[in-house]
Structure formats: C-alpha cells, structure tokens
Image (cartoon, rainbow, N blue to C red):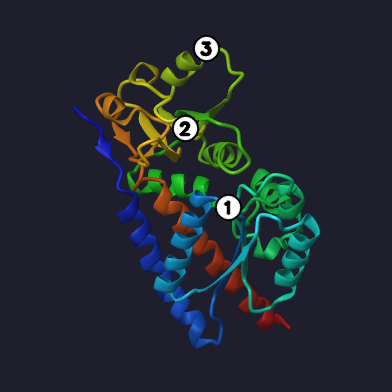
Amino acid sequence: MPATIIDGKQVAGEIKAALAARIASLREQGIQPCLAAVLVGDDPASQKYVASKERTCTQLGIKGIVHRLPSTTSQDELRALIAELNADASVHGILVQLPLPGGLDEKDIMERIAPGKDVDGFGPVSLGHLVMDQPGFLACTPHGVIKLLDAYQVDPAGKHAVVVGRSIIVGKPLSLLLLRRNATVTICHSKTAGLAEVCRSADILCVAIGKPGFITADMVKAGAVVIDIGINVVTSGALRGDVDFERVRQKASLLTPVPGGVGPLTIAMLMQNTVLAAEQRLRDQAQR
C-alpha cells in the first residue's frame, strides 16, 4: 500500500491560524510583531525564500522588513546592519538568509544577532539552550519536522530515528529535538560507512543532504516514516527532494512531498518564533 503523503501546507495553515489570534492580541496592546530579513546578493533560491516569508508576514499581520544588500557588501557593513537591528526596539526578530556570498563569515554574523531576536534559532545561545533542554528559539525547519510528526501522530519515543545530514541548520538541531522525544538517534553524513544499511534500520528517516533523489527505495525499511527535507532545483527548473519520491512512496508508511512537505512548516515556525519574541518583549516591558 502506497505511503500516506504528509500535507505540510495543511499543518502549516493550522499553525498560522492559531498565530493569528496571538498577533491580534499583541496589536491590541500596541505591539506589531516585526521580522527584519537580511538578504545579501542575488541568489535566486534565497530571493524566492525571502519573498515567501515576506508574503506570509503580510498575510498574518506581521511587519516584514527586507534589507536587500549587494553581493559586494563587506563583513563590516553587514555587522553594522545587524548592530542597528539589534538596537531597534521595534524589531522583534532578525533573519539573515543563508547562504551568504563567498567571502562573508556566516558564523560571525549569526553570533552577532541578539539572542532575544534570533528567530532562526541558529545562534550559539539558542543552540546552547537546545542542548541543555532549556526554553528558547528552536531552529525552524527541525521544529517544523517535529510538528509534522505530531500532526500525523508519530511518536518518536523508542523508535530508531536516522538523520542524514549534520548541518547546524537542520541535522544537528533535529537530532537533538528527536532525542527530546526519546528517540534513539543516529546521525549520518558523507563519511558514514554502510549508509544504506543504516538508513534501512530507521523507523523514522529524515534526510537533508542536498542531493536530488539520493535516498532510493532499497535504502528504506518497509513501513518507515520518511521526512524529505531536501530542496533541489534540477535542470528542468523543477524542485526535487533528496528522496526518490515515486519509488519510496511504495515502501514507506508516511512520506513528505517536495514541495509542500517540510517547507511550509519552516516558514510557519519562523512566524511563531517572531510572535514569541514579540510576546517576550511585552512581558519585559510589563516588568519594568
């Protein structure tokens, strides 16, 4: 029996609908959640992602500001903009669209975003809170994956979860979130020996490596839950995931499509983090 296809758009829609009431409450109290996005260069995929986030802000009543900078922007110029946004009390969340053009130090920039505005959840304070199981901003895509599992009543507890990819954006934080849910987690990467065998042992297989169609049906256990986090633009211009969708759907029990799977949740969780930041600002003001 073919896999049930996970509807990320529907789950994201439910999350955004719940956010609408919280945003309305904030605005009644004189606060409009504000997300400032920084886009450096003219990478088409990055431009598309930022435009989508901008549209979602408008739909929800979040103020979205996009700082579009040329690829010639220097490290010092970018640092200055981050410092300006950190100091702006009307800005609740700061998003720096990655990857940055060559020559710019991404790690340095992410470390400079104020922890209270790190709505992407990539900064050292946010990641440290995740490691220590403390409250804080969760990285949007990994958190979105957990929301999808919850929506389809997949309990990771006691299951073997395999995460293919070890990036700070997806692989590492997702592994920690699955550990929080009491899964037994294996992280795989380009140096993993016997990758296919490890993948076949997974009850929950999460893939984020940026190689279209890399995970084939013979790498998937019958009945596994497969979460495809990859977004790849192929020569035809179409989007493809890291999983061979048509063949794997004949073997998995649940499968995310690309597009329409994890992607909508990434944006929804970014909006949720921005609202959380605005709510925290309101609490801070009340305590002064």
Q: Which residue is the site of mark 2? A: 207
Mark 1 or mark 2, whichever is nearer to me: 2
- Name the residue type under label 2: Val
Distance (Cα) linking label 1 and label 2: 19 Å
Residue 58: horizontal and vertical position, in percent? 43, 73
Left or right side of 124 for 37? left
Which of the two labelled residues, at mark 1 and mark 3, occupies the earlier sequence position? 1
Residue at 58% of width from left, 73% of height from top? 278
Left or right side of 185 for 219? left
Residue at 21% of width from left, 30% of height from top? 2
**The quarter of the displayed image where residue 193 is located:** top right
> Secondary structure under badge 2?
strand
Residue at 25% of width from left, 37% of height from top? 4
Q: Name above or below for residue 28 compared with residue 174.
A: below
> Secondary structure under badge 1?
loop
Q: Nearer the viewer, residue 235 or 170?
A: 235
Q: How many marks?
A: 3
- Name the residue type under label 3: Gly
Q: Which residue is the site of mark 3? A: 194
> Secondary structure under badge 3?
loop
Q: Name above or below for residue 37 compared with residue 179.
A: below
